[in-house]
DNA sequence: GCGGCTTCTTAGCGCAATCTCAGAGCCAAG
DNA sequence: CTTGGCTCTGAGATTGCGCTAAGAAGCCGC
């Protein structure tokens, strides 16, 4: 595995920090800061995939760090570590802009699982496309009809629909579709076939023909 | 009467609360909280045998309270109260980590019966993950089918299912699964094999294939 | 140290998915 | 109305992915 994702870890307790960094380094390129000031400086200077911030820090406090980071319009997912049983900390922590929290003492596997979920959550979002009353999620290659019924698309069908969704108004020529969806085919007939497949699965509601020019998304009536 | 089991009751409607507390006090040492915030604070500070949480609460909502409690790794069985006819509430309630639910208005005997059942059956069972009508408890590596039948999973099977449960919608690639579930393997075929094992044990209801991409949790239709 | 259980590898089979092709259907211009 | 090009659609041929069985290697407990 070449480039591992960068992670910033702000924690003042050096005993905890040392152990945790060791574990984290198996999956991340870890920068560790022992104070809120150092951590904030790093967060503002470098790009990280994800951050782990202790709530209690000498000087600049964890919540303050997160607030400062958010004020700089950095949207990196942040997991906050809090001491056991301090409820108010948790609430203000999430309010301050943290995306998740974990109670100390924590299990390393739990920490790794949360971090994965956090990164996935951010990566996976925003991949929803609406076509009239239909919903299309390219990641799962699934199309939902207006009643919520699930229709599974194949890879090529999904790629084609994804392309059409990029510009709902635009009319895509066969060559345009061929060069992006299909690796390299000379026969433009393939496009017709896959448009046909899409229509068959969607009761002819999704794709519209523009004669002599190509295809585009079906207008929601 | 010596030491009665401790029960936490979170309910904002004071009329209902008063009556209910009176009944509950015959069998439990009851702490009552009128808001989600107060209830959460108590739940995190004290140990209870069982909790009863209203779905609708001013401020911090019932589901949010349960989620927060579970995130703090508190496995106390929780019974959620929901308003009449709100099916979605039921689903999100269970998803959030409640062990049972009861529709308001409820019968006091019914409530007491459910609480007894809850304490008998679900005491200290650990994390729970719901997959459609199936229940999976990673700590005991046990999968329960919709009828409650117990299926024991091996370590690797459990780790795989646990990973998939982290993000129910997400499609996990073979590499992604390999790097987290399997220590160090080059052959992606191992993933296929364990998916196969899971399916064999679960009558092919749990894991879904996304061709050429990977696997994800099977959606309850 | 033997037997059972778990883990992981390998390889063949089946089938879904991809793509080609050809005939039927449709539209528009003359 | 007729003609020619454009589009639709079903029927294969082929490829490669995923499923599965079977067995080797490793890890316990008895």
Image (cartoon, coloured by chain):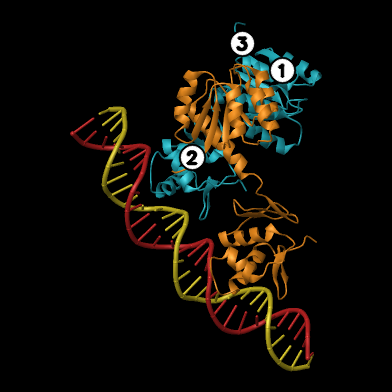
Chain colours: A orange, B cyan, C red, D yellow
Q: Is residue B118 left or right of residue D23?
A: right
Q: Residues within 10 Å of mark 1 (few under 14, many from 20)?
A: some
Residue B74 is situated, as x and y percent measured from the top left of the image, at 58, 22
Residue marked by disc 1: B38
Residue marked by disc 3: B4
Q: Is residue B211 left or right of residue A87?
A: left
Q: Quadrant of the C terminus of chain A?
A: bottom right
- Secondary structure beneath disc 3? loop
Q: Residues within 10 Å of mark 2 (few under 14, many from 20)?
A: few
Residue marked by disc 2: A4
What separation in Å lies between label 1 and label 3 (alpha carbons)?
Answer: 22 Å
- Residue at the (55%, 39%) spot, across then down: B165
* Residues tagged by mark 1 and mark 3 found on one chain of the structure: yes
Q: Is residue A199 left or right of residue B168?
A: right
Looking at the picture, tell me which residue is in the foreground, A38 or B78: A38
Q: Is residue C18 left or right of residue B35?
A: left
Residue A178 is situated, as x and y percent measured from the top left of the image, at 59, 68
- Residue at the (58%, 26%) spot, across then down: A39
Q: Chain of mark 1?
A: B
Q: Residues within 10 Å of mark 3 (few under 14, many from 20)?
A: few
Looking at the picture, tell me which residue is in the foreground, B136 or A106: A106
What separation in Å lies between label 3 and label 2 (alpha carbons)?
Answer: 53 Å
Q: Quadrant of the N terminus of chain A?
A: top left
- Ranked by sequence position, the earlier of labels 1 and 3 is 3
**Which of the two discs, 2 and 1, sits closer to the camera?**
2
Residue B191 is situated, as x and y percent measured from the top left of the image, at 43, 46
Q: Chain of mark 3?
A: B
Do the numbered discs 3 and 2 sit on residues whose CB atoms are within 8 Å? no
User: How many numbered dots are placed on residues in this image?
Assistant: 3
- Secondary structure beneath disc 1? helix
Relative to D18, is A188 above or below?
A: below
| Residue A59 figure quarter | top right
């Amino acid at each position: 595995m070449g480039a591992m994702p960068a992670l910033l870890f702000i924690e003042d307790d050096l005993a905890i920090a040392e152990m945790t960094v060791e574990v984290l380094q198996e999956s991340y390129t870890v920068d560790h800061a022992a104070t809120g000031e150092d951590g904030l400086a790093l967060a503002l200077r470098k790009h990280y995939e994800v951050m782990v911030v202790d709530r209690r820090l000498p000087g600049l406090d964890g919540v303050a760090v997160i607030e400062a980071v958010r004020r700089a319009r950095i949207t990196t997912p942040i997991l906050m570590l809090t001491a056991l049983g301090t409820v108010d900390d948790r609430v203000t922590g999430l309010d301050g802009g943290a995306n998740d929290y974990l109670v100390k003492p924590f299990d390393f596997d739990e920490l790794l699982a949360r971090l994965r979920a956090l990164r996935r959550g951010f990566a996976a979002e925003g991949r929803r496309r609406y076509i009239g009353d239909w919903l299309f999620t390219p990641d799962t290659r699934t199309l939902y009809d207006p009643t919520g019924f699930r229709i599974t698309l194949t890879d090529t069908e999904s790629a084609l629909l994804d392309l059409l969704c990029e510009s709902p108004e635009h009319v895509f020529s066969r060559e345009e579709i061929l060069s992006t969806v299909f690796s390299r085919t000379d026969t433009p007939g393939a496009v017709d076939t896959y448009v046909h497949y899409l229509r068959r699965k969607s009761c002819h509601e999704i794709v519209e023909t523009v004669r002599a020019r190509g295809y585009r998304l079906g207008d929601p009536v």
